[in-house]
Amino acid sequence: MKLGVILGALAGLAVATGLILHFGWRQIGDAAVAAGWQGLAAITAIYFACLLISALAWRAVITVAPRNAIFACLWGRWLRESVGNLLALLPTAGEIAGARELTFHEVPPGMAGASTVVDLTLELVSQIVFTLFGLSLFLIVYPGKGIGTSLLVGLSISAATVAGFILAQQKGLFDLLERLPERLDLKRAWKALPEAESVQAGIHKIYRHYRRISIGAGWHLAGWVLGAGEAWVGLWFMGHALPWSDALILESLAFALRTAAFVVPARLGVQEGGYVVLGALFGLSPEVALGLSLLKRARELSTGVPCLIIWQGLEARRLWRSRQHSQIG
């Protein structure tokens, strides 16, 4: 585990803790608790709806027909996010775990890795479109705020990052991706399937299907828009309702901050600080903004922990079956 990742996590945790202590943990806790179980249940329902949309986006770019396709992608996506949110000290662990699950549903390892990379790319591209829409809406609704230039600079940096990621797929990332099956612990299966595509070939194959790319990007864009409902509904249950347009702007910019801070595990401190700064633009007090962040962290725990438990149960069963087969053999 890289020292930088650990230091990033500690720094983010320190920032989040400092914000909570500075603005008063009791007031922040009261703001989050005001949403109640009903509020947590409501944003959880929205999350799972977004999860289904993300699964449909992933399925769109897989050029083979997996067994139980939608279920496989839904489960893989849920695991990807749960590992990414709760086991964030392990870089790319969520993506690797999700891709590995696809291989248990008759998806070749190369296509599992390739579809994960392309899906992530489309998610980032659609997020830039979503952020650009939110920024445009902000400049129209609040022309006098005077922070449009700063936001545009940040958006340009994000766009350049994504462009570099796409270029890397075409130029130099393939060598790294070719080793993905070994990281998935699928080296034996890889060798046993000579017809299986490499990750590089899989990515090229997917990008030739323009219709699949368009559908995947469209689903992701719909997911970003629906995902803004978490903040909108959460604030409503907290007693600090915002117009839908404001919630959309808030989340489009908050999501952009989280993505830009991808090097910080679980975006610790970034999400909290982002909500404090952005929430002030819409009249939200720091206590309410941090309360919203705390509510969303609670949702991550309530959806992520059960997923990790199920995953470990599946892994234990697979290990047991593997040992049984080895004993029989």
Image (cartoon, helix red, strand yellow):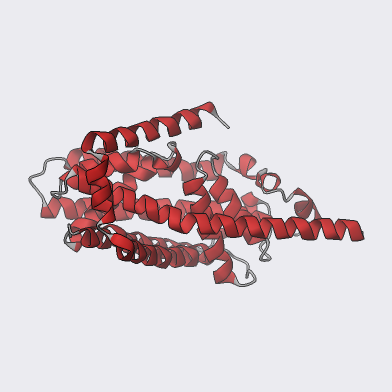
The reply to whether residue 88 is in sight is yes
Depicted 225 relative to depicted 151: above or below = below
Quarter holding the N terminus is: top right
Measured from the top left, where is residue 254 in percent x and y? 29, 47
Q: Residue at left 45%, top 39%?
A: 265
Q: Viewed as shown, does residue 47 lie left or right of 147?
A: right
Measured from the top left, where is residue 301 in percent x and y? 44, 53
Measured from the top left, where is residue 251 in percent x and y? 28, 53
- The one of 184 and 323 positioned closer to us in this rendering: 323
- The one of 326 and 218 positioned closer to us in this rendering: 326
The reply to whether residue 111 is in sight is no
Q: Residue at left 17%, top 52%?
A: 138
- Please identify the quarter of the rendering in which residue 23 is found: top left
Depicted 218 relative to depicted 168: above or below = below
Quarter holding the C terminus is: bottom right
Q: Residue furthest front?
A: 26
- Please identify the quarter of the rendering in which residue 16 is found: top left
Q: Viewed as shown, does residue 309 lie left or right of 128?
A: right
Measured from the top left, where is residue 71 in percent x and y? 56, 69
Q: Residue at left 15%, top 50%?
A: 282
Q: Residue furthest left?
A: 144
- Please identify the quarter of the rendering in which residue 17 is found: top left
Depicted 286 relative to depicted 60: above or below = above
Q: Residue furthest right?
A: 329
How many marks the image carries: the answer is 0
Q: Residue at left 66%, top 54%?
A: 110
